[in-house]
Amino acid sequence: MSLKGLNPASKAQVYTYSQTKLRAIARHSDFGVSASFQATYPANSITLVAIPKA
């Protein structure tokens, strides 16, 4: 994903809803972002990547 026009903070928060835990949204470890990032997520899931401004 490319983050054109955004000066992101160094860490993003990740939340996932998937078959692994149907009764809750799981909070994952923060991961580093810059002007772009690449990640893989589980099939049949919903993932929110919250990238705050620097």
Image (cartoon, grey):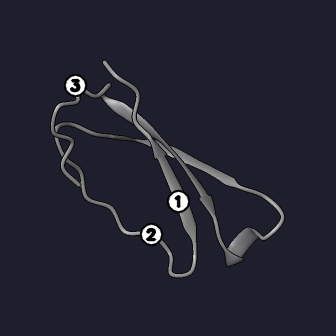
How far apart, in angstroms, are the residues tagged by discs 3 and 1?
A: 21 Å
Q: Which residue is mark 1?
A: 47
Q: Which residue is mark 2?
A: 41
The image position of residue 24, as x and y in percent, is: 78, 58
What residue is rendered at 57% in x and 72% in y?
45
Identify which residue is drawn at 44% across, 69% down.
Answer: 41
The residue type indicated by label 3 comes to Asn
Question: Is 30 placed left or right of 16 in the picture?
Answer: left
> In the picture provided, is 51 more to the left or to the right than 15?
left
The residue to which callout 3 is attached is 7
Q: Is residue 41 above or below residue 48?
A: below
Q: Are marks 3 and 1 in contact (CB under 8 Å)?
A: no
Check disc 3: other Cα within 10 Å, few if <14, some if 14-19, many if 20+.
Answer: few
* Secondary structure of the residue carrying numbered label 1: strand
Asked if the residue under mark 1 is in contact with the one under mark 2, i.e. CB atoms within 8 Å, the reply is yes
Mark toward the start of the polypeptide (2 vs 3): 3
